[in-house]
Each structure stands twice: as structure tokens, then as C-alpha cells.
């Protein structure tokens, strides 16, 4: 019996499931990187194609990572007001390092460091964490959730006819629905109706 065992097994052992989800989440985030000098650049930024059950399982992990990164960016902004502009190991930097402002900066910066470390544990890829904090999270800073969408593809996978889906970030290829204006009818009041006859 599967009492309290949530989620899909995807035909894999638990360690293999975790590795699969980490790799899918990292692959989605790494599509946002600059791929100028990359031998295997992504075809479309912010989008991967996988099977539908895998997309549904990896989506909560990606959303959690983006939420972590957004909170980390808020902490970095709060710490920026206590930071010093001096170069490292200069006299001015050493004075700042021994002052109360450094303690305030350190306390404000701690949640940002924790967020990066937790994202690294969840994703398992340093490049993906860097791209997450530098490119993905700033786009979704004002959004309260729902950072990804799943679109089902009509053509199944060749070989086993598995249902395929696109997992992508929202905000880039959004459809804008233009609603037609409601028709305005001229209304005749009783006073004007009597005057016309």
C-alpha cells in the first residue's frame, strides 16, 4: 500500500528520482544562460520538452527554487545599504570590516547566503544557481508565484508514444487576449420617446 507516499515514482528508485528532478530543473534554468561560447546552446530560452508526468513532478521544485532566489535577492538589497565601496584589503575596507556597519551588513547578508546554499542543495549545479539568482529571479521579483507553465504537445514521443509536454517560464511567450469592447446601444428615455411621436 502507498499510504502517505505522494508523488510519482516515474519507474525509478528514490535516489534516481531525485537526480532526475534535479537535472530537469537545472536544465530548465540553464536554458536562460548566455550560450555564445557554448557547444550545445539551447534551442529556445526558458523552455524544455519532456514527458508530461516528469514536467508535473519537476514544476514544484522549480517554483520553490525561484521563490528562494527572490527572497535571497531581497536580502541582498537590504544588505547593500551597509556595504562598503572600498577595495578589499585597503585601509578603508579594514576600518569598515571592524565597524558596526560590517556587522549589520553581515546580518542582512546571511539570508541571501542561506538562500544560495539551499538552492545549491536543491539543484546540485553551481552554474544553475548562478543563472537562477542573476537572470531568472530578478524577472519574477514582483510575482507572487506561478513562474512556470506546462503545455501539452499533441504529438506523442516516438518509440513508446509517451505524452510530451513543454515546461517553460511565464512572461516571455504569453498570449495577450484582446477583448472586444461591449457594443453600446442607444437607450431612449420615456421623455424623448414621447417627443418623437
Image: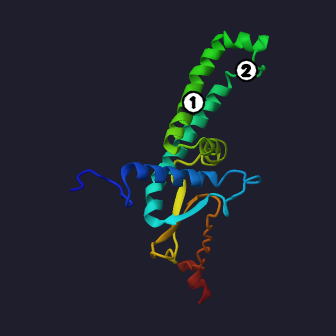
Q: Is mark 2 on a helix, strand or loop?
A: loop
Does residue 124 sit above or below 195 in this rendering? above
Q: What residue did someone put label 1 on?
A: 113
Residue 7's image quarter? bottom left
Q: Residue 133 got which mark?
A: none
Q: Is mark 1 on a helix, strand or loop?
A: helix
Q: In which quarter of the image is the N terminus?
A: bottom left
Q: Residue 186 occupies which quadrant of the picture?
A: bottom right
Task: Please name the residue shown 48% across and 61% down the image.
Answer: 55
Q: Pinpoint residue 77: horizontal percent, then vertical percent.
A: 64, 32
Q: Residue at x 68, y 50 (%)?
A: 33
Above or below 69: residue 161: below
Which x, y percent locates residue 118?
50, 36
Residue with the mark numbered 2: 84
> As drawn, is 158 to the left or to the right of 87?
left
For mark 1, does the 10 Å Cα neighbourhood hold few (<14), some (14 to 19), or many (20 or more) residues? some
Q: In the rendered image, which quarter contains the C terminus?
A: bottom right
Front disc: 1 or 2: 1
Amino acid at each position: 500500500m502507498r499510504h502517505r507516499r505522494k508523488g510519482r515514482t516515474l519507474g525509478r528508485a528514490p535516489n534516481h528520482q531525485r537526480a532526475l528532478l534535479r537535472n530537469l530543473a537545472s536544465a530548465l534554468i540553464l536554458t536562460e544562460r548566455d550560450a555564445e561560447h557554448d557547444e550545445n546552446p539551447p534551442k529556445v530560452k526558458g523552455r524544455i520538452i519532456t514527458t508530461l508526468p516528469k514536467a508535473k513532478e519537476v514544476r514544484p521544485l522549480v517554483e520553490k527554487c525561484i521563490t528562494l532566489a527572490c527572497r535571497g535577492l531581497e536580502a541582498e538589497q537590504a544588505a547593500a545599504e551597509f556595504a562598503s565601496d572600498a577595495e578589499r584589503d585597503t585601509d578603508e575596507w579594514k576600518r569598515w570590516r571592524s565597524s558596526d556597519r560590517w556587522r549589520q551588513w553581515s546580518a542582512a547578508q546571511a539570508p541571501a547566503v542561506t538562500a544560495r546554499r539551499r538552492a545549491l542543495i536543491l539543484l546540485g549545479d553551481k552554474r544553475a544557481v548562478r543563472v537562477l539568482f542573476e537572470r531568472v529571479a530578478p524577472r519574477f521579483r514582483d510575482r507572487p508565484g506561478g513562474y512556470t507553465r506546462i503545455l501539452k504537445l499533441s504529438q506523442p514521443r516516438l518509440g513508446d508514444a509517451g505524452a510530451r509536454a513543454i515546461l517553460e517560464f511565464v512572461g516571455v511567450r504569453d498570449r495577450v487576449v484582446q477583448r472586444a469592447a461591449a457594443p453600446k446601444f442607444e437607450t431612449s428615455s420615456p421623455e424623448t420617446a414621447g417627443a418623437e411621436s
